Image: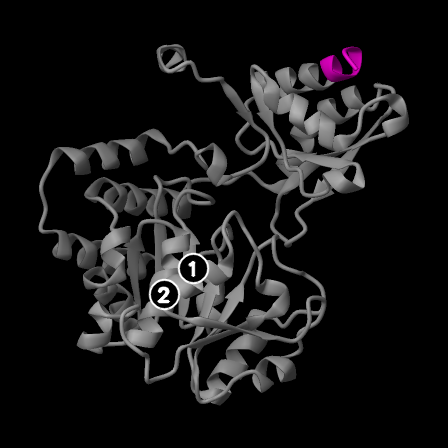
Amino acid sequence: MSSIYEKYQLKPVINASGRMTLLGVSTPAPEVVDAACHGMAHYFEMADLVDKTGAYIAGLLEAEAATIVSCASAGIALSVAAVIVRDNPALLVKLHAAPIDGPDEIVLAKGHNVNYGAPVATMVALGGGKVVEAGWANECTPAQLSAAVTPRTAAILYIKSHHAVQKSMPTVEEAAAVARAHGVPLIVDAAAEEDLNRYYRQGADLVIYSGAKAMEGPSSGLVLGRRQYVEWVKLQGKGIGRAMKIGKEGILGLTAAVERYLSAPKSSGAEMARRLEPLLARLNHLPGIRARLAWDSAGRDIARAEVAFDPAAGLDAAAAAQRLKAGPPAVYCREYHANEGRLEFDIRSVDDQQLDTLGHCIETLLKER
């Protein structure tokens, strides 16, 4: 492994930012890698592979249907295209080249129209949709969501993410009730969420997950939901989905990852908190730093170290984050609150040796300021 870093002159990375795309997301388990390797080494009838693995995963998750796509972003675009195109053969191949006579508006709460590394609105546009915002950046009631629905509405889109506004937003159940009342589907983007059944049970017609985040599969995405809508997502393989197709290795790798995810023991937030205790104690002995335990803002069972920097001590949070990334090793943390003087360190992908190195790197920052 070290030869790869040397051959291409790459810096080793400590990923204390979580399951993030910019670092390659996750490191799949050996059995997932084996399944992906088996896929690369053999031939399949691809349509049959897509159908059979999708049906198998749907059975595991007690959903009507499922299909594997190239990533969660592709899942958004393909789901939007699916509810607009449906089974219209002409529109399927001319989605961006011909006027859309039917519904093409995608309603979402204004506070959900976020940039998660790419704008949600870009993925909606890629699927042929037009974003219609409901409510305000800091408020969207079910009534406001309902008021945004018109005869041009193709679907309601719900973004379940720490990137989205958390306060004064409708729940998935409330959004599902609005969708049912208007006879339109509800699409839930749950890319980094850890419960693979919850949003489908709560009434979503299509739910999108990243295969590489919570499930720790290869680069991939999972779309599950009502059978007709999933079939329309699969049909997009003959339209815009051709540019987003996933290979056989990704399909078999994610299928194995789903199996493993449902059966393997998972680290709890309490376990993460225990692992963080020595680091917090170590950092709280440093001048100009206050470290404490912080819980995931979107409600997931994830504990992190929150480190506040006092600029009077000679180093602010934004500068600290940049210097940590300068490495080697390059240490990546969560910088969402750097403007407020705080960084967060997520240790789900950090082993004990790296955790010690992380503490040393922060100590070094203060010595060199």
Q: Is 315 left or right of 151, judged from the image as shown?
A: right
Query: Does residue 352 show up?
Result: no
Q: Which residue is mark 2?
A: 127
Q: Secondary structure at mark 2?
A: loop
Is 269 in front, or is 205?
205
Is 261 in front, or is 148?
148
Q: Is residue 109 above or below residue 38?
A: below
Q: Is 329 left or right of 38, judged from the image as shown?
A: right
Give the residue type that dot 1 points to: Met
- The reply to whether the C-beta atoms of the residues labelled 2 and 1 are less than 8 Å apart is yes
Q: Dot 1 surroundings within 10 Å: few (below 14), some, or many (20 or more)?
A: many
Q: Dot 2 surroundings within 10 Å: few (below 14), some, or many (20 or more)?
A: many
Name the quadrant containing residue 92. Answer: bottom left
Q: Is residue 365 highlighted in magenta?
A: yes
Name the quadrant containing residue 304. Answer: top right
The residue under the point 18% across, 57% down is 52
The residue under the point 36% across, 15% down is 4
Q: Which residue is mark 1?
A: 123
Q: Secondary structure at mark 1?
A: helix
Q: Is residue 282 above or below residue 228?
A: above
User: Total marks drawn?
Assistant: 2
Give the residue type that dot 2 points to: Gly
Give the CA distance from mark 2 to mark 1.
6 Å
Q: Is 57 left or right of 144, judged from the image as shown?
A: left
Q: Is residue 229 highlighted in magenta?
A: no
Q: Main secondary structure of the magenta part?
A: helix
* Highlighted magenta segment, given as a residue range: 363-369
